[in-house]
Image (cartoon, helix red, strand yellow):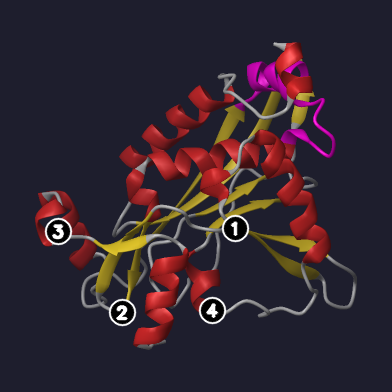
Amino acid sequence: MTINETDLDNILDRFQGEPIRSDAFTSYQKTAMQFFHDEAFVINPYLSITTQLNLTSARAIYDHYYGKVAGSSFHIYLTWNLARALKEEKCFSTRKIGDTWYQFDNLPLYFPIIADEDTRFKDVFIYDVLNCDWERFVRQYRESIEASACQLGAVDQWTWSIANFIGNLPYLNFTAFSLHRITKKVGRPIFYFGQRTSGNDQCVVPLSITIDHANADPYAVDLLIKRFFRLLSSVPEYSSEEVKRLI
C-alpha cells in the first residue's frame, strides 16, 4: 500500500514525524532495517515474546495514589505507563512508510474493545497521548471508548498501521500469544495484556509483545520493560488536586 504526498504530510504533521537522517542510524540499525525487510533473506521479520510481569508493587502504588481519579482502572494505569515508556525508548516510535524510516514524537494509541456479538469489536483511538497527564488520559480513554464507532476501518489505514497497539485480554491467562503476520511492515510493536492472577500476595499478568526485528530486538524490549516498571513505581505531577492531597 502506497501513500500519496498529501497524506504523508498530514501524517507527519499530525503525529510529529520526521525522516531519520542517514547519519543518525547506528551501524546495527543500518543492517537490521535493511536485512529484516528483505524477503530474499527473511520472510517474517516479527518476533513474539510473552513475559510474566509481577505487578504487586505497581498495584499498591495505583491503589494509593492513582485510583481515586474518576473513571480510572488499573488497566488504564498500565496502558498509560506503557505508552509513556514507548515514547522514551525511541526505537519503538520509528515507522517505515514507503522506503523511508521516520521518527514520531506523538503517536496515537490504538486498541480494540468488545462491541457486540454482531460486530464483535470496535476500534478505539486516543490522540495526543504525549500531552496527557494521568487525569486527562483517564478522561480521554473513557471518552474515546464512548465516541468510537463500531464500524471497522473508520480511521484511515495509515493512522491505524502506525499507532501504538496496546490491547487487553482480561479473561485469558495465556503463556504464549502469537499474532498473524502483517503484510505492511511499518515497524509497529503490538502489546497484549492478559488475565491478572493473584495469589500469595502477588499480582501477576502475562504481556505479549510482538516487535518488528527491523527496528527493535530483545535487548530493546528489556530496556522498555525496565523503563515501564520505573514509571509504574513513580509518582509524577498531575493536575488533580484530589490526587495531590493523597501523596
**Which of the two discs, 2 and 4, labels the residue nearer the N terminus?**
2
Judging by the rendered image, the residue that carries numbered circle 3 is 30
Q: Are marks 2 and 3 in contact (CB under 8 Å)?
A: no
**Which of the two discs, 1 and 4, labels the residue nearer the N terminus?**
1
Give above or below for 159 relative to 5. above
Tag 4's secondary structure? helix
Residue 37 location (% of width, % of height): 27, 70
Question: Residue at left 82%, top 25%?
Answer: 68
- Give me the disc on residue 157: 4
Judging by the rendered image, the residue that carries numbered circle 2 is 98
Per the model, the C-alpha gap separating discs 2 and 1 is 23 Å
Tag 1's secondary structure? loop
Task: Count neighbours of disc 3 (C-alpha within 10 A) and say few if under 14, some if 14 to 19, many if 20 or more.
Answer: some
Tag 3's secondary structure? helix
The nearer-to-camera label among 3 and 1 is: 1
Per the model, the C-alpha gap separating discs 1 and 4 is 16 Å
Displayed quadrant of residue 143 = bottom right
